[in-house]
Image: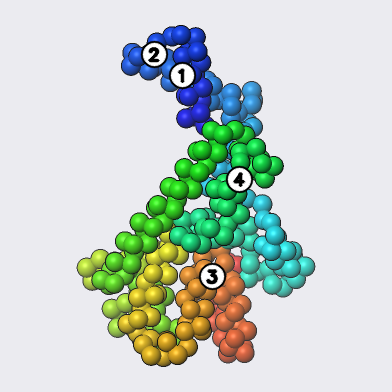
């Protein structure tokens, strides 16, 4: 919006026949800032611009749920005994959406991405993204292309680092094997390897999911071998679920899954984690 405000001020001076030079930059910036504040804020300082509101909710992971995610949240509201396993539905779903926007290929299935890249600025669907002009749409498209470029570059770097052992994933699906790796002190899940030490990358939203998935694919080749090829659908399911459900906001679903698939054998561990989460 600052870009649009600056362009607006600059073009207004041009229409008046005023020749703008570097010496006028300070004046331009001040006038653009005034124009920007009028665009984005009301007189009492509240945000009024739809694009700013959309970007704000996106950054804070507070966008309203829709579609299946909204229905899913209603199920938990109607089943209060399940709610402790899924406390922050909106935050978790928005975190996954943000990750998907940076994931090459996956971002093509996001409605926001497909709308912006394929529809005209005056299409009725564009209003929800705060797009009100051709300039708005141009900026939105540039943002999408930038995210795709970052995703491709990041994925490439992560793959090279994982192949060289500098990034670890979730490890093999067998829990006993994973714990044996950790017990010898030579491996930690979802971490960067720096010298002989491991540093977690969990806080690097939205890229931690990409890092984990890339490392898991490499681990699959090195560890699972023929068994992985023979059971590839089960393994791929594990890789995807481990990286998506590993999000802190959705970790409760993993606990619920463990409780159900273990037929109650994991109950003590799940209950201990549950109590810890509540505290």
Residue 201 position (above or below residue 240): above
Q: Could you tell which of marks 4 and 2 lies nearer the N-terminus?
A: 2
> Do the numbered discs 4 and 1 sit on residues whose CB atoms are within 8 Å?
no
**226 vs 81, nearest the viewer:** 226
Res 175 visible: no
Q: Could you tell which of marks 4 and 3 lies nearer the N-terminus?
A: 4
Q: Could you tell which of marks 2 and 1 lies nearer the N-terminus?
A: 1
Residue 49 x, y percent position in the rendering: 62, 33
Query: Mark 4 to mark 3: distance in Å?
Result: 33 Å
**14 vs 182, nearest the viewer:** 14
Residue 135 position (above or below residue 157): above
Query: Mark 1 to mark 3: distance in Å?
Result: 48 Å
SS of the residue under disc 4: loop
> Do the numbered discs 4 and 2 sit on residues whose CB atoms are within 8 Å?
no
User: Which residue corresponds to the image point at 57% horizontal and 48% vertical from the top-left?
Assistant: 118
- Residue holding disc 2: 20
Residue 273 x, y percent position in the rendering: 55, 75
Query: Mark 2 to mark 1: distance in Å?
Result: 8 Å
Disc 2 crowd, CA 10 A, few/some/many (<14, 14-19, 20+):
few
- Residue holding disc 4: 119
SS of the residue under disc 1: helix
**81 vs 239, nearest the viewer:** 239
Of the two numbered discs 4 and 2 in the rendering, the one whose residue sits closer to the viewer: 4
User: Which residue corresponds to the image point at 62% horizontal and 34% vertical from the top-left?
Assistant: 132
Q: Could you tell which of marks 1 and 3 lies nearer the N-terminus?
A: 1
- Residue 10's label in the rendered image is 1
Query: Mark 2 to mark 3: distance in Å?
Result: 54 Å
> Do the numbered discs 2 and 3 sit on residues whose CB atoms are within 8 Å?
no
């Amino acid at each position: 919006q600052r870009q649009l405000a600056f362009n607006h001020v600059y073009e207004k001076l041009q229409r008046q026949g005023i020749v703008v030079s570097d010496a006028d930059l300070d004046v331009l910036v001040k006038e653009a800032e005034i124009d920007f504040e009028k665009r984005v804020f009301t007189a009492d300082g509240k945000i009024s611009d739809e694009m700013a509101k959309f970007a704000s909710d996106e950054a804070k992971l507070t966008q309203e749920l829709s579609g299946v995610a909204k229905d899913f949240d209603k199920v938990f509201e109607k089943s209060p005994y399940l709610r402790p396993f899924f406390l922050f539905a909106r935050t978790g779903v928005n975190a996954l959406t943000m990750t998907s926007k940076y994931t090459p290929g996956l971002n093509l299935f996001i409605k926001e991405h497909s709308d912006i890249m394929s529809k005209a600025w005056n299409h009725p669907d564009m209003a929800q993204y705060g797009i009100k002009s051709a300039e708005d749409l141009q900026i939105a498209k540039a943002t999408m292309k930038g995210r795709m470029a970052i995703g491709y570059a990041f994925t490439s770097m992560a793959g090279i680092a994982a192949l060289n052992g500098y990034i670890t994933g979730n490890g093999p699906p067998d829990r006993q094997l994973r714990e044996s790796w950790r017990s010898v002190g030579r491996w930690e899940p979802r971490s960067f390897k720096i010298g002989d030490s491991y540093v977690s990358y969990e806080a690097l939203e939205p890229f931690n999911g990409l890092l984990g998935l890339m490392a898991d694919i490499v681990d699959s080749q090195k560890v699972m071998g023929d068994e992985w090829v023979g059971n590839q659908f089960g393994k791929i399911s594990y890789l995807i679920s481990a990286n998506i459900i590993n999000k802190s906001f959705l970790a409760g679903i993993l606990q619920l899954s463990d409780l159900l698939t273990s037929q109650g054998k994991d109950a003590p561990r799940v209950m201990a984690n549950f109590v810890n989460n509540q505290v």
